[in-house]
Image (tube, rainbow, N blue to C red):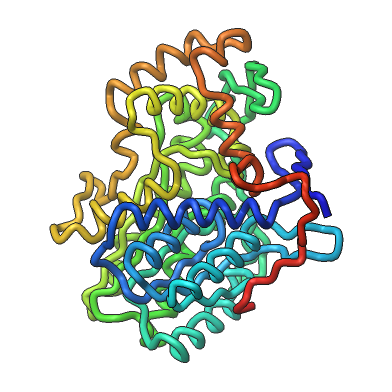
Amino acid sequence: MIIEPRMRGFICLTAHPEGCAQNVKNQIEYVKSKGKINGAKNVLVIGASTGFGLASRITSAFGCDAATIGVFFEKGPAEGKTASPGWYNSAAFEKEAAQAGLYAKSINGDAFSNEVKQQTIDLIKQDLGQVDLVIYSLASPVRLHPTTGVLHRSTLKPIGAKFTNKTVDFHTGIVSEVSIEPAVQEDIDNTVVVMGGEDWAMWMNDLKEAGVLAQGAMTVAYSYIGPEVTEPVYRKGTIGRAKDHLEATAFEITDALTSIGGKAFVSVNKALVTQASSAIPVIPLYISLLYKIMKEEGIHEGCIEQMQRLYADRLYNEQNIPTDEQGRIRIDDWEMRADVQEKVAAFWKQATTENLSEIGDLEGYKQDFLNLFGFGFTGVDYLKDTNEMVLVPSI
């Protein structure tokens, strides 16, 4: 079938298998161009199919020569219907890993469930014995709690007061005002259950109890802080409460791993175009302004550049891992530079529909959004008949 992007709001309903494969190849080539990293050898990536999780898996494999197990929840293809992009990404990753002689297997299922945790433990025992790095990069809007059976849904809401500010429809370029009603306590509680640290701690406890964590094993989860302009709807909103919980959980996990000399870290990453960030009001406008400035300064990074730098300069730099006063790894350091944020704040005040194409990088935003689904890559013939029935070899 000929596969074209079909948009509905902030999601694309189709994905291009050859475009997704090109995306994976591009990321692999970047990591290889930066040289080898003396890092982890057996890596579990929970949430391994897109964004930071996929970039972590690629960096582990092609930067560190690591064996990887990836856990994700993706939709496979059906005749005449494409799979989700994460499915095609994972199929391409496994193919590239096999050609490079690297072990790579994947598990497709609900990572919040006890069943998938046990399936993962069984696979580690069978094939790897133990893992020395666990990346936790889940980005789900809902969680079926494995103990209570309750389905929790996260929300994107401010806390305490209604929030009103600028946003942009990145499809049309129209800058407008958006208002979001404040959260009630139930919204906060549900968001913390879905996006906080409880499931991360459950994973690490189960892995430790099963004896599949190597001596000195590390685990890293991902967070975001961002600038003052996004604070009410992000860091000081419902998601921020969940991130606070996630960050606090890192210390609890480190304490629980004392007997094996293990450590847990939260890495605060840069604002990037993801399916999740595209759904957050205000964020697309902020990112389009940020991209323009960081590209002009020569410090712009995508997911793969961020993860390669995290591994090479932070996790495995032969020194003590540098952290801020809250114990967090700050790989958002270039985004949060004072000069960058001052320029963003100035442009934010000026931003209108008419001038956004000059002061922002909306085209870059759109390009990155299309890339998430395998569209817009050089070297891919999007007009030719493409086989949508691509399978993930290990599934």
Most foreground residue, 189 or 226: 226
In the rendered view of the protein, which quadrant contains the N terminus? bottom right
Say above or below: 269 vs 217: above
* Residue in the picture at 58% in, 10% down: 352
Say above or below: 119 vs 328: below
Q: How many marks?
A: 0
Most foreground residue, 156 or 31: 31
The residue sitting at the right extreme is 80
- Tell me if 81 is positioned left or right of 211 in this view: right
* Residue in the picture at 24% in, 75% down: 216
* Residue in the picture at 30% in, 68% down: 218
Q: Quadrant of residue 146?
A: bottom right
What is the x, y in percent for residue 359? 49, 14
- Tell me if 83 is positioned left or right of 330 in this view: right
Q: Can you see residue 258?
A: no
The residue sitting at the left extreme is 319
Q: Can you see residue 239?
A: yes
Most foreground residue, 246 or 322: 322
What is the x, y in percent for residue 377? 60, 43
What is the x, y in percent for residue 304? 42, 50
What is the x, y in percent for residue 128? 40, 85
In the rendered view of the protein, which quadrant contains the C terminus? bottom right
Most foreground residue, 161 or 177: 177
* Residue in the picture at 60% in, 80% down: 115
